[in-house]
Amino acid sequence: MPTMTAAQQRAQAKLDYDAFLAGCPSRRLLDRISDKWVALVLAALGSDGPHRPGADGVGEPRSMRYSELARRLAGISQKMLTQTLRSLERDGLITRTVTPTVPVTVTYELTELGLSLHDLMRGVKEWAEAHMDEVLSNREAYDTRVD
Amino acid sequence: MPTMTAAQQRAQAKLDYDAFLAGCPSRRLLDRISDKWVALVLAALGSDGPHRPGADGVGEPRSMRYSELARRLAGISQKMLTQTLRSLERDGLITRTVTPTVPVTVTYELTELGLSLHDLMRGVKEWAEAHMDEVLSNREAYDTRVD
DNA sequence: AGGGTTACTCTCCAATGGGAAGTACGCACT
DNA sequence: AGTGCGTACTTCCCATTGGAGAGTAACCCT
């Protein structure tokens, strides 16, 4: 018979988990991906949005300027845009190119790695578009049920 | 010639975007999905983890108790676990079942909708596992480059 | 009556993110 | 020469968020 209370077991599980976490690659990468703005920046660079004519979200990886991204993702603060771009660059998902033009020009572009992640995210986006109505009606049902 | 400064244009773009945002289903759902704990709870309920023998992450949607989830995702606080479970229930991605046993038992299970999202997320998880080394070495290269 | 169990809820505090303003650089106009 | 404009940031301040830990309700067992 173990000499552990449930609380002690929970504390132990937490230690095990933390050790596990430190060595777990997918968890750390998941932290990167499940950032509110990462997916959005990826989507913007992966050539979707209303300004793109032609096929639905499939095309050449597009290079965009900082200001262009800021306009496209207008909800984002400049701080978070810069921060997100830096971390994506650090991880090798995008490239940052500085051109010393009249006012300096900085462009960002998906790398091959970034593009491969974007392709997956597109699947999630399509799921969202396909099932949003269902989710919304579930929400409404839940809220009125609790009345 | 427009009579707008760049700042004004940006403000205008922001208004346009906000209006767009309000009506955009995928954006709102993306906010739900790109929550640190949502993906983790989904993964836990979608029968992966070391305690599951047999096939790699593919199986019956598993029902788990609150305490079982808390143990599995030991990094999560009780507050966030409860909050995440509630929001997932509200959206119809999981079900919550209360059984009035001696100490009350509450079990959670993926719905069909939740399962379909989980299947997508598994793809992301696999991407993460496949490319984490690459990301890690990119990070290291970036950090030493800046020395 | 006191202790134990589950599934929360509440309270406090530290970290995170947004908004607005400021910075550096360089041309361009007066 | 000085003021202004434009890009691409950085800095400061403050509201919101999330974590840690204690508390709660219900019920059984000893």
Image (tube, coloured by chain):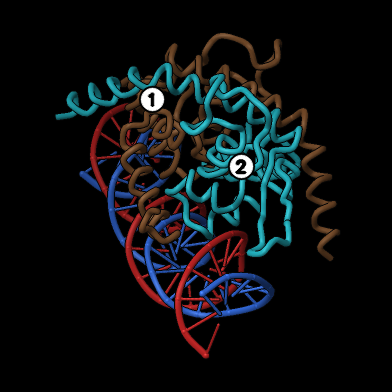
Chain colours: A brown, B cyan, C red, D blue
Disc 1: host chain: A
Alpha carbon of mark 1 to alpha carbon of mark 2: how far? 28 Å
Q: Secondary structure at mark 2?
A: helix
Residue where numbered disc 1 is placed: A106
At label 2, the amino acid type is Asp
- Give the quarter of the image for residue A3: bottom left
Residue placed farthest to the left in the image? B147
Residue where numbered disc 2 is placed: B31
Q: Note whether residue A46 is visible.
A: no
Q: Residues within 10 Å of mark 1 (few under 14, many from 20)?
A: some
Residue nearer the viewer, D22 or A127:
D22
Residue nearer the viewer, B45 or A124:
B45
- Give the quarter of the image for residue B114: top right
Residue nearer the viewer, B34 or A147:
A147
Left or right of A66 in this view: B110: right
Please tell me which residue is depicted at 32% across the width and 27% down the height of the picture.
Answer: A90
Does residue B117 lie above or below B87 as drawn? above
Query: Picture coordinates of residue B122 (x, y %)?
Result: 57, 25
Q: Secondary structure at mark 1?
A: strand
Query: Picture coordinates of residue C24 (x, y %)?
Result: 23, 40
Disc 2: host chain: B
Q: Quadrant of the C terminus of chain A?
A: bottom right
Q: Residues within 10 Å of mark 2 (few under 14, many from 20)?
A: some
Please tell me which residue is depicted at 54% across the width and 48% down the height of the picture.
Answer: B68
At label 1, the amino acid type is Val
Q: Note whether residue A51 is visible.
A: yes
Query: Picture coordinates of residue B141 (x, y %)?
Result: 23, 21
Please tell me which residue is depicted at 76% across the width and 41% down the height of the picture.
Answer: B23
Mark carried by residue B117: none
